[in-house]
Each structure stands twice: as C-alpha cells, then as structure tokens.
Image: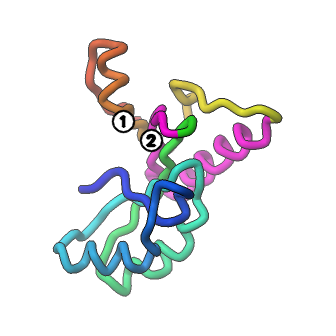
Amino acid sequence: MYLNTHTYYSLRYGTIKPEELLVIAKHQGIRSFALTDINSTTACIDFVRLASKYGINPVLGIDFRNGVKQEFILLAKNNQGFQNINQYLSAILHQKEYQIPSKPEFLDDTFIIYPFSFAHRSQTVFIILR
C-alpha cells in the first residue's frame, strides 16, 4: 500500500488533482492508499467522497514537514484519529512562528511513520503502531 501520496494541495510539491490520483490508482490495480498532503488536509473531503467511485479504500493522513524536510507522517486509524491529526496540525500552524517537531506528541487512533533518515539518527527503522 502507498503510504505517502500528494495532490496539488501539497503546494509546490504536488501536481495532481485528487480525482486524477484515484484514476491512476484504479488503473494500476491499487485498492487502498493514503493521501498525505504536506501540512494540509484540504483534499481529504474530495478524496473520500470520490474514492468509492474508483473502488479505492481511502486512508487519510498528513505529511508533516518543515520546508522540504520531512519530519514524520501521521495516518488516521479512524474518524477520531483524523480529528486528532487535524487538531494537532491546527495547533502547530496557529503558532506565530511555527516549527514542526521532529517527533509528534502521542495521538490516539493514529499511526506514525518516520522517514528513513530518522532511522540514521536513532539507528532503528520502525513504524509506531498504536
């Protein structure tokens, strides 16, 4: 399963409409993937609304970045997890001069995925499943 896909709502980093991403996924035989735009959930409503039309099981999350530096990805296990992720992102973005932390605070109903470069810092490769 693809765990990190972006639409054009990942400003400067994504180039595709949410529906076009679903069309490509269907043609490739993908049945489920995670939409994780950078510091944004703008495309999520359209993605979920359209996913069943293409036989795709939608997974929602956010790719948390400071500029081009990926810190981590949060994926929602369910609606409550998605709400928790949105509240966490909102709290960060509403700071006067925000900085995405290198590790998120604990959020119920979410999965955390760290970039491979994180493993080089900690000497361990892992995905945290809660």
Q: Residue at x 30, y 29 (%)?
A: 116
Q: Check disc 2: other Cα within 10 Å, few if <14, some if 14-19, many if 20+.
A: many
Q: Check disc 1: other Cα within 10 Å, few if <14, some if 14-19, many if 20+.
A: few
- Image coords of residue 1 (percent x, y): 24, 56
- Image coords of residue 90 (percent x, y): 71, 46
Instruction: Report if residue 90 lies within the magenta region.
Output: yes
Q: Residue at x 46, y 75 (%)?
A: 17
Compared with residue 86, is residue 71 higher up or lower down, i.e. above or below?
above
Reading the image, the residue beneath label 2 is 73
Compared with residue 24, is residue 62 higher up or lower down, i.e. above or below?
above
> Which residues, given as a range, are shown in magenta?
68-95
Q: Residue at x 31, y 21 (%)?
A: 119
**Going by the picture, which residue comes out furthest to the left?**
29
- Image coords of residue 83 (percent x, y): 62, 53
Q: Residue at x 53, y 56 (%)?
A: 12
Q: How is the image coloured?
A: rainbow
What amino acid is found at the position of numbered circle 1 in the picture?
Leu
Instruction: Report if residue 7 lies within the magenta region.
Output: no
Compared with residue 107, is residue 6 higher up or lower down, i.e. above or below?
below
Relative horizontal placement of residue 40, taking residue 16 as reference (left or right): right
**Going by the picture, which residue comes out furthest to the front?**
12
* Quarter of the figure with residue 9: bottom right
Reading the image, the residue beneath label 1 is 129
Query: Quadrant of the image for the C terminus?
Result: top left
Looking at the image, is mark 2 or mark 1 earlier in the sequence?
2
- Badge 1 marks a residue whose secondary structure is strand
* Quarter of the figure with residue 16: bottom left
What amino acid is found at the position of numbered circle 2 in the picture?
Ile
